[in-house]
């Protein structure tokens, strides 16, 4: 199976069904050499991936710099690049490990969803990337999960100021598509009342493990022609490692998985074992069955990991496997499965 491409909303952009999540290139959880980062992106391009997603937050500029270095000699028409706005990087006294990033970049991320903040963030990203354009611009991490009691205030600023700036950048042809990059579909649903988006980068909220968004939100996206780019297809790791990996604590939503999640994944793993299907392969392929979803973008950090992930996308999964998950009520009854798309 080749890595196919799908169109983003009503734009002319076509993205590979498997994309490259570049948070790892910001030294997420452990350092990596620059050469490894460039080699990973080179391998991705050789294997048919054309979609690369980064953000100022990832390593406080490090991921953007590395992505730009790796893509600089590639014709702009051969890749689709996304980055994010909503945080500005402020110089600090020294670099230190924080927020999971072991980055040598001496900056602190500061939220700013205002019109001026978004415009500055876009300009700074262009300079860090050293590339002529950004294809997709996402507003990063708005929502109750991130901001708690400050959500309403920041959401109002984002809708009245930040979105206006993003819409202007799109109208001027400086970016081709705009959307949100978030961990909660509810804030996407709310923002769609105010905004005309092309796509949404939704992390972890339509996966093999959880599909509540299939009830009303994803149908709304289909009706509005808003494409979903599915980040976090492994739900922070538990759908990649499973729950029986010795020496590893299964993680869900960036924290050790609660007992109910572990139990559900254990049931899914049992079905995988019966049909000799890698859990990670099922996790990657499942979301693409929904017509709203155009791609999945796991974090990729090395040439070997890129190659292994492409292999998972190419695993032939029998129809009976998906039927078994449905019969055991391990999938939402409204969630389409890959066999229905193929047939």
Image (cartoon, rainbow, N blue to C red):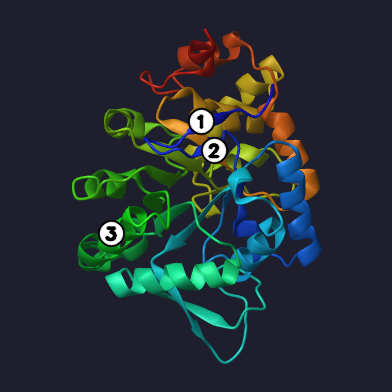
Q: On residue 163, which mark appears?
A: 3
Please tell me how many numbered marks the rendered image carries: 3
Q: Horizontally, is 230 left or right of 151 in the view?
A: right
Q: In this rendering, is residue 296 above or below 102? A: above
How far apart marks 1 and 3 lie (CA) works out to: 25 Å
Res. 260 visible in picture: yes
Please report whichever mark, 2 or 1, sits nearer to the chain's N-terminal start.
1
C-alpha span from label 2 to label 3: 23 Å
Q: Nearer the viewer, residue 200 or 68?
A: 68
N-term-proximal mark, 1 vs 3: 1
Q: Is residue 246 left or right of residue 290?
A: right
Q: Are marks 2 and 1 in contact (CB under 8 Å)?
A: yes
**Number of the label disc, if any, that sits on residue 6:** 1
The residue nearer to you, when weighing 75 against 278, is: 75
Left or right? Give the position of 136 relative to 186: right
Mark 2 Cα-neighbour bin, 10 Å: few <14, some 14–19, many ≥20:
many
């Amino acid at each position: 199976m080749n890595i196919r491409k799908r169109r983003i909303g009503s734009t002319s952009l076509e993205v590979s069904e498997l994309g490259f999540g570049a948070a790892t290139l910001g030294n997420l959880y452990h350092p990596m050499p620059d050469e490894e980062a460039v080699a990973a992106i080179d391998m991705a391009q050789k294997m048919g991936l054309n979609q690369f997603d980064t953000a100022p937050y990832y390593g406080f500029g490090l991921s953007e710099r590395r992505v730009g270095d790796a893509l600089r000699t590639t014709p702009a028409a051969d890749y689709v690049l996304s980055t994010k706005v909503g945080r500005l990087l402020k110089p600090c006294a020294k670099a230190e490990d924080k927020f999971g990033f072991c980055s040598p970049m001496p900056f602190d991320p500061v939220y700013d969803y205002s019109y001026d903040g978004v415009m500055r963030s876009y300009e700074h990203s262009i300079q860090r990337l050293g590339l002529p354009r950004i294809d997709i611009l996402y507003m990063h991490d708005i929502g109750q999960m991130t901001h708690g009691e400050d959500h309403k205030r920041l959401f109002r600023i984002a809708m009245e100021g930040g979105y206006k700036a993003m819409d202007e950048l799109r109208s001027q042809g400086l970016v081709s598509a705009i959307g949100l990059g978030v961990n909660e579909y509810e804030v996407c649903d709310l923002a769609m009342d105010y905004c005309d988006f092309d796509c949404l980068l939704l992390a972890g909220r339509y996966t093999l493990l959880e599909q509540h968004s299939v009830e009303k939100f994803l149908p709304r996206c289909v009706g509005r022609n808003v494409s979903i780019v599915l980040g976090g297809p492994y739900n922070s790791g538990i759908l990649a490692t499973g729950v029986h990996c010795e020496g590893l604590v299964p993680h869900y939503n960036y924290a050790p998985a609660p007992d109910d999640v572990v139990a559900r994944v254990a049931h899914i793993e049992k079905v995988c074992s019966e049909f000799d299907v890698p859990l990670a392969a099922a996790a990657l392929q499942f979301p693409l069955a929904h017509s709203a979803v155009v791609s999945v973008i796991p974090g990729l950090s090395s040439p070997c990991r890129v190659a292994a992930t492409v292999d998972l996308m190419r695993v032939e999964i029998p129809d009976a496997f998906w039927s078994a998950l449905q019969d055991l009520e391990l999938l939402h009854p409204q969630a389409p499965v890959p066999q229905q798309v193929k047939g």
